[in-house]
Image (cartoon, helix red, strand yellow):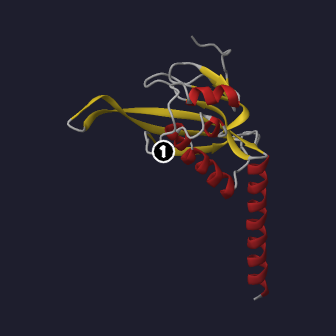
Amino acid sequence: MSKWRTVAGATLLSVGMVGAVATWAQGSRPNNPPALSVEDYIEIQQLVAHYPYPLDTNPDGGKSYAANFAEDGVFHDQHDWYYRGHADIATAANLDKRPPSPNNVGHFIFSHVIEPTANGGAVGHQQNFLISEIGDAQDGRRAASIVSYQYEDIYEKTPAGWKFKVRTHPRPGADPPEREGDLWRIRPLSRP
């Protein structure tokens, strides 16, 4: 009986040591980004889910849209234009100077993937269907255009919660800006 206890004790000790070494090895690898909490994932998902509403409805001239971004955040649009900071990003949401339109819904975001990064932030990828009315109404009907886009994001945790540090919206078939680890190489701001 004591031999059995010795074998069982040695086995448990060995398993415990292997588990401890494996846990230490995983935590000490430099390429292993820190895990995000469940709350972080939920807050980032809520940020992305909320994103289309101020863009589509324009309740305040782009201000609530810009509030989704960090103070020095960058939006790169499908025309290859860059907007930096809240005031500039608000103009991107209000280029057509349309009045508030609470019934306008056009951006449908899906297939959202969130990945933690080594600096404690996160990156994300998602698909977007943009549905727009085109042409004049005939017999009470209008034609619609449906275009599929992608969004590529860098998220940053700020005192006000998770925000977009960079959101790029490349043209269909175009590559997003070059990315180096947690950062994209952002060209100087210029647009026609």
Residue under numbered circle 1: 102
Q: Residue at x 79, y 70 (%)?
A: 13
The residue type indicated by label 1 comes to Pro
Q: Position of residue 32 (x, y in %)?
A: 71, 44
Q: Position of residue 107 (x, y in %)?
A: 46, 39
Q: Residue furthest top?
A: 192
Q: Secondary structure at mark 1?
A: loop
Would residue 126 be visible to someone looking at this image? no
Q: Is residue 98 above or below residue 32?
A: above
Report the quarter where the N terminus lies.
Answer: bottom right
Report which quarter residue 124 is drawn in. top right
Identity of the residue furthest to the front in this view: 99
Q: Reply above or below: 61 against 4.
A: above
> Is 78 on the left-hand or right-hand side of 29?
left
Please report the residue visible at 72 percent of the width from the left and 36 percent of the height from the top.
70
- The answer to whether residue 60 is seen in the rendering is yes
Residue in the picture at 50% in, 31% down: 98
Of 50 and 76, the residue lying toward us: 50
Report how many numbered discs are placed on residues in the image: 1
Where is residue 60 drawn, in percent x and y? 60, 38
> Residue placed farthest to the bottom in the image?
1
Rendered image quadrant of residue 4: bottom right
Q: Is residue 85 left or right of residue 93?
A: right
**Which residue occupies the foreground of this view, 49 or 144?**
144
Query: In this orientation, which residue lies closer to the viewer: 147 or 112?
Result: 147
Expressed as whole percent of the image width and height from the top left, the position of residue 37 reads: 70, 55
Number of other residues with Cα within 10 Å of mark 1, as a class: few under 14, some 14 to 19, many 20 or more: few
Q: Is residue 25 left or right of residue 82?
A: right
Question: Which quadrant would the C terminus be assigned to in this image?
Answer: top right
Query: Vertically, is 65 above or below 46?
Result: above
